[in-house]
Amino acid sequence: MKRQYIILGLLLGCLQLAQAQFTLDGEFRPRTEYRNGYSSLIADDADAGFGISTRIRLNAGYEVDAYTFYVSLQDIMVWGENRQILPYDQNNSFAVFQAWADINLGEGFSTKLGRQVISYDDQRIFGGLDWAQQGRNHDAALLKYKKGSFLMDIGLAFNQDYSHPTGFVNAGTAYNTTGFFSYKTMQYVYLKQAWEHFSGSLLFLNNGFQKFEADDITPDGINSLQTVGTHLDYKAGSLGIAANAFLQTGDVVKSAYLLGLGLTYKASSKVGLGAGLEIISGNDVSTSKNEAFFPLYGTNHKFNGFMDYFYVGNHANNVGLFDIHVSANFKLSDKSSLLVKALNFSSDRELASGEKSLGTELDLVFSQAFKGYALKIGYSQMFAADGMYELKGITEDAAASGQSWAWAMLVVKPKFLNGGAN
């Protein structure tokens, strides 16, 4: 009789899987980098950096009519950082990258709860930051609505770090996780409407950052920061136009803005052209008034040069940026392409010397797809101007004559299982 129950249970389990969508996939992404001026100017007497990091992810998804469940586990390894036969991960990088459930509420509504990637539009304010091996996620709750070409997301988050091993003891006092605009609270509304050739979105975002008294220990409420703006996108035929306009204000930032405009044109089946500019407000070094915009949780590596001199863990509350860029994307074959991009940088506000010119960056990226995997190779060169040396705190005589960065990345994304159907 027990055997019959076991067989019946297995049959019911198989029937449930047949009515569901279960996926299991992974990612293996090693990247080699030669850094001789990446992120900041390197001194002439400093050695260039060279290393290899690897991202490994295992992703599982389960979908039925009532809900979707997803979990993504990842580890980031730098080759050689663990000594031989070490029984544990020395860099403590293993993490749950995503773990969420999206519950169908009916009539176009759903709620997505848990650790998740939040990404909208061109990822200027919210993005997954996939270039970084660790990526970016949020612990948040979303109420989602979609009907036709209209969608609305309402997002809420409350972050906490418990001060006692058992959990909630004194948990309601201070949020001590700091750095990179880690927030204690977040609320936002995102609206988007799409038409045949045009789409537009609105974002209303409020972040609350833990505020402390002068001792940096005693909590003293929160500092609020509001970010409001729009992304507009037009595509018709060979022409594409995209624009960003965002404002920031709050307890610390009084008035800041970001304006961006990008044009794309498909000159032929083999060549795509691009041009654009971006203005990000900065601070006047002669006053203490904060008017510097920071693009918060976007994929900032995608903007303002691949060498990450601006707004990638740096350049917060600084003199801002005026970025003009042109690009060309050449399709070399069905599976290969070459991107060439040139960017000219100036500061939005004058540096202490009165200088504004920062320099020019050249980015090259070659991509080659193979059966089941892809290879990407990049090279970037920074041609620094006088303002860049002042901004980065190094003299031209002390800096290396060539500021460069080169990398190669292999991307393997196996799909282990993709079975069932709703």
Image: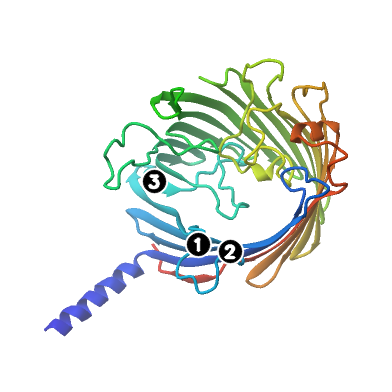
Give percent across and percent down for residue 407.
Answer: 73, 59
Please report the residue visible at 88 percent of the width from the left and 39 percent of the height from the top.
Answer: 397
Decide which of 369, 390 is in the foreground and name it.
390
User: Mark 2 sits on what residue?
Assistant: 81
**Looking at the image, do the residues carrying marks 1 and 3 touch, with CB atoms under 8 Å apart?**
no
Give percent across and percent down for residue 121.
Answer: 59, 40
Under circle 3, the secondary element is strand
Q: Earlier in the sequence, mark 1 or mark 2?
A: 2
Real-space CA distance between mark 2 and mark 3, rounded to the nearest whole angstrom: 37 Å
Residue positioned most to the left: 1
Q: Quadrant of the N terminus?
A: bottom left
Callout 1, which amino acid?
A: Gln
Quick one: label 3, few (<14), some, or many (20+) residues within 10 Å? Answer: many
Please report the residue visible at 54 percent of the width from the left and 44 percent of the height from the top.
Answer: 119
Please report the residue visible at 44 percent of the width from the left and 66 percent of the height from the top.
Answer: 23
Q: Quadrant of the C terminus?
A: bottom left
User: Mark 1 sits on what residue?
Assistant: 90
Real-space CA distance between mark 1 and mark 2, rounded to the nearest whole angstrom: 7 Å
Real-space CA distance between mark 1 and mark 3, rounded to the nearest whole angstrom: 33 Å
User: Mark 3 sits on what residue?
Assistant: 112
Q: Earlier in the sequence, mark 2 or mark 3?
A: 2
